[in-house]
Image: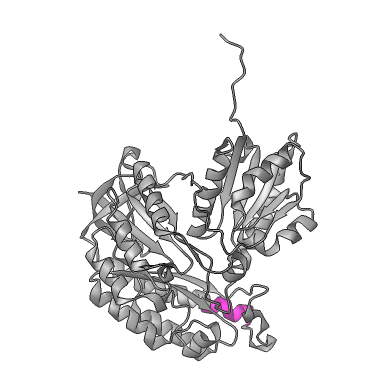
Amino acid sequence: MSDLPTLGPVGGRVYIETYGCQMNIGDTELMAGVLAERGYVRVEDPDRADVILVNTCAIRERAEERVRGRIGQLQRYRRGRPDLVLGVTGCMAQRIGGELLRQGRGVDLVVGPDAYRRIAELVDDIRDGSLERGQALLELDAREDYAGLPSLRGQGVSAWVTVQRGCDHRCTFCIVPYVRGPEKNRAPDEVLAEVGAAVRDGYSEVTLLGQTVNSYEWGEWDFPRLLEAVAREPGVRRVRFTSPHPNDVSVRLLEVMAGEPAVCPQLHLPAQSGSDRVLRRMVRRYTRERFLEKVELARRIVPGIALSTDIIVAFPGETDGEFEETLSLLREVRFDDAYLYRFSPRDGTPATRFPPEEFVPADVASARLERVIDVHRSLQLQLNRGELGSVREVLVEREARSPGDLLGRTATNKVVAFKGGDELIGCYRDVRLTATTGATFSGEAV
């Protein structure tokens, strides 16, 4: 038997842990691609890694608290390995990266969302001693759209394709424009080339990503035209997109959704509040009436469309009556899904400058969140019970926690568990919906 050592990758092994939204998933795949070009292999266990990156979210305080705790936990991997490099990337890095370095939390580098092109070079220089630890790349670049860089996709059955970075909206509660910069759109030919590459790699579902994705523009291209072109790419069976802004939901966009079989009949419409006064203070640029008009338009043009939303409760100054207006909006629209949060102040955003007396007490905010969750879950259960007995095509995503079960999603983004083997992951199966918890379904393969 040979005593030759097992050869490792040329660059090393990198472990990337991802927090936050789908944009961060896409960014993780981008960083993995950049590092792969320098010989780094992505691993799924930090104990095997030469480089550990934590890709972070800054949208809420709790997300940052989780990351701070995780950075402390990851220090154990340094024991006996002084050459290990630990980096923090993403929105939290952009927001407080300098603070993380000054606090001596065991972070070797911080890299913001516009600096991933240089991350492999920076990691290499730290590892070979050319650069000291404690490096920061935090400059926002209005021109950086990562043209020409490959993504190395992780496990999963949907290909995340970023078409837009940054945001030109300045909602008073949101940190995104400050940590990701202004809106930057990718050239349509680059988007279509990436979609084609994803299909060749075996993906049949594509999710287009942007902070306000439906505001996309490039020359004569708008988002409906881009969506239509992606849907017509050979090999694409399903197309999703997130996260649109209600103001840019147009008749043309909905007509593409209705007319292109590959476009999933599911639309995320972030309402945030049901109160006109709160919406004005949030600078959402639409009224409750205008939002409801978009809902009616979507349901008229795309029959059977599933709608989801975001809601923030306890925004500064929100009264009991205005909170009740949000509950009434939920009851009127009856969303298929909702992401529900209590207001989280983010330093640097305009909402933190409201008078202190307008901030809703923590106990009141928690009670409002519990109530809005209860109302939504009740409505969701009613809606999903109405689908029992129907047969839906499910794209199988992964094994479920319950032995012998698989998890997948319908075209309307409903989660379904059913019996099956792991050889079905990535395949489409017709499933009869037999039971629901409200949030998910159980079913039987047909």
* Colouring scheme, one of rainbow, by chain, secondary structure, one colour: one colour
**Quick check: is 372 in the magenta stretch?**
no
> How many marks do you count on the picture?
0
Which residue occupies the foreground of this view, 290 or 144?
144
Main SS, magenta region, reads: helix
Q: Locate residue 159, reporting x and y percent.
A: 40, 50
- Residue 410 seen in the current view: no
On screen, residue 435 above or below 348: above
The residue shown at (47%, 44%) is 154
Which residue occupies the foreground of this view, 18 or 389?
18
On screen, residue 212 above or below 275: above
Start and end of the magenta stretch?
361-368
Q: Is residue 420 left or right of residue 25?
A: left
Q: Locate residue 324, reporting x and y percent.
A: 46, 86
Q: What is the quadrant of the N terminus in the image?
A: top right
Image quarter of residue 231: bottom left
**Quick check: is 363 in the magenta stretch?**
yes
Which residue in the rendered view is the most extreme toward the front?
219
Q: Locate residue 225, reporting x and y percent.
A: 32, 65
Q: Locate residue 57, reporting x and y percent.
A: 59, 61
Q: Is residue 15 left or right of residue 201?
A: right
Which residue in the rendered view is the most extreme toward the top?
1
Q: Is residue 191 left or right of residue 390?
A: right
On screen, residue 303 above or below 411: below
- Residue 289 seen in the current view: yes
Q: Is residue 35 left or right of residue 102?
A: left
The residue shown at (62%, 18%) is 5
The residue shown at (33%, 78%) is 295
